[in-house]
Amino acid sequence: MKRIIIFFILLFGLSSIDMQAAEVDFKVSAPQQVRLGERFRLTYQINADVDQFTPPTLSGFQILSGPSRGQNSSIQIVNGKVSQNINISYTYILAASQEGKIEIPPAKVKVNGKIYQTKQKSINVIKAEQNQNSTSQGQNKSSQKNGTLKANDVYIKAFTNKKSAYLGEQIIVTYRIYTKVPVSNLSIDKLSSFNGFWNVELQENNGNLKQRNEIINGEEYIVADLKKTALFSQKTGTQEIEPMSLSCVVQVQTTKKRTSSNDPFFDSFFNDPFFSNNFRNIEKTLFSNKLSIQIKDLPKANKPTNFTGAIGQYSLGSNIDHRELMANEAITLKYTISGQGNVDLLPDLNIKFPPDFEVYDPKVSTKTRKNKEGISGYKTYEYIVIPRSAGTYKIPSVGFSYFDPVKKQYKELTSDSYEIKVTKSNNSNQQNVTYGGSSKEDIRYIGKDIRYIFLMPFELEPYEHFFFGSYIFYLLLLSPIIIMFFIVLLWKRESKRRGNTSLMKNKNATKVAKKRLKKSHEFLKAHEEAEFYNEIGQALWGYVSDKFNIPVAELSIDTVNGRLSEKGVSEEVIKEFIDTLNNSEFARFAPGDKDSMMEKVYQQGLNIISKIEDQLK
């Protein structure tokens, strides 16, 4: 009762005493210096109720989350004076996407109709590689054991095969990842739009990355090319290529348990940090470096008059099907330009045919090839021409010019010339010729393309029996209904059979899983690492999904753990199964003998499925 009285006295006292209004304090906090791609917090704090928050423009940073609003308040009574403390915060999670000193403009808030703003904040963004030399290899390993990640443990870089190029010259840009730790779930968040360039993808990122080992500053890295693009500049001057942004999950070891056995290979394999349970996954966003390319204009000296902008290294060839023919017969003349460069943008040829030749629009076909060296291929121009009069004619040679960026000079190519002998046609029907396509087969002669109806005498005889009203007539009339009846019966039977899908999947789960394991063993023998791990993962996850009727969308480590526990599977076997799932995900980036690792993972998958089957019986 006393507590209730005291509560009402305090409540009445608080309502009768004015709150002391503290002076509004609006401030910003963020680190003074960050590395390129490093995540950090940008926090705005104010000690008053906010009517409106106006965030600044955060150029030069990638906003990963925010602003997230937080609030806490308290009331204090000192010597009869009541004061209220309010603290409201707005927090961003940012990642630096460009180097240099970046200024963050002031943020603004409205409190009781009055505008307050923070001071301008400066953040110095340095290269991620600047910290590589200051960290020794032993310190990096120690940091990984402690669950932390250094800037040089995993990063991406962008390369070009040339720092300067001519207008329209082919440039190869490569994005490459370097890692000393296991990574997974690689996802490109942002790629440069390549403003000022015409681009063609040379390597699509389909999840099967070709890996290799490289020694950098005395440390071993696993390296893979993420993306390779061919660029063709469309304007001169200094062209900038913005950084690529990539998200991934990095596995960092926290502690390392040692096991011992008589087999030294067994110890080295199963004591490897990639096969230890003592790790944690870190979501990491990586940024490549910005590229700058100087694009030069083509030289004006010695430029051919017929030059139309072709850049690269090319050759020109031609052929003709025959040089002697009769009037109104067709000739096929073909020109081919092949070489290294952007063959899709090669111009049309300027060919001067004799006036007595009827010339149709050429059939143009292009074939391109993509490889690590860039784009190459050929472009073919196929002409159909028909001489209308007898005589001797000459088809002059065709000129083609291009700029060779390697030799830095213009080059001119010339095709062969052809002399055509046309004799007078002996067939009067050939004086009328029509053409409807781009090949000789499309040419036909008027007067020969009409086929008249062949007439012959027909005798009609009376017949006593009629099909209408016969037994066969009524049988065929009812046949659709009979067929439909059987179709409905079969459909219902099949629907009932397929209704028990979970039972069928449960019975076939082990069979399907072992079939996938057998296929993965074939990839193991063929040393196809990416296909092997993909098949192992589908075998393990598919087995759990089919065996326990878990939808694919709900598959997770927690779901698997719960279902196995419900079925009475021991904790030891559950733990071994989860370890096998993790090993199949991260082993592909593990250093060491790849074939031995794949063999061990294969044996683990085969053994754990057998153990689960034994405990479910």
Image: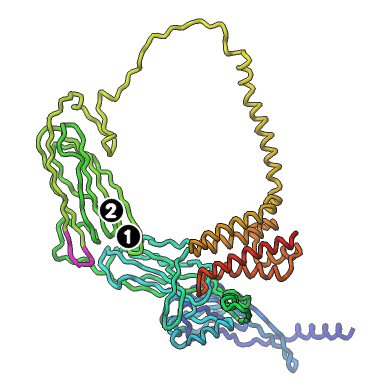
How far, Cα to Cα, is label 2 from label 1? 10 Å
Could you tell whether 614 is left or right of 313 in the image?
Answer: right
Identify the disc placed on residue 204.
Answer: none
**Mark 2, residues whose alpha carbon is within 10 Å: few (<14), some, or many (≥20)?**
many
Frontmost residue, 365 versus 423:
423
* Residue occupying the point 52% across, 78% down: 39
Q: Which residues are magenta?
A: 404-411
- The quarter of the picture where residue 194 lies is bottom left
* Residue occupying the point 50% across, 84% down: 119
Q: Quadrant of the N terminus?
A: bottom right
Identify the disc placed on residue 375.
Answer: 1
Under mark 2, the amino acid is: Tyr
**Mark 1, residues whose alpha carbon is within 10 Å: few (<14), some, or many (≥20)?**
many
Question: Mark 2 — residue?
Answer: 378
Look at the image and tell me whether residue 253 can be seen. yes
Image coordinates for residue 507, horizontal then vertical, percent:
69, 52
Image coordinates for residue 278, horizontal then vertical, percent:
62, 78
Under mark 1, the amino acid is: Ile
Residue lying at the far front in this picture: please name it: 262
Q: Is residue 202 above or below residue 51?
A: above
Please give the count of numbered marks on the rendered protein: 2
- The quarter of the picture where residue 196 lies is bottom left
Look at the image and tell me whether residue 247 can be seen. no
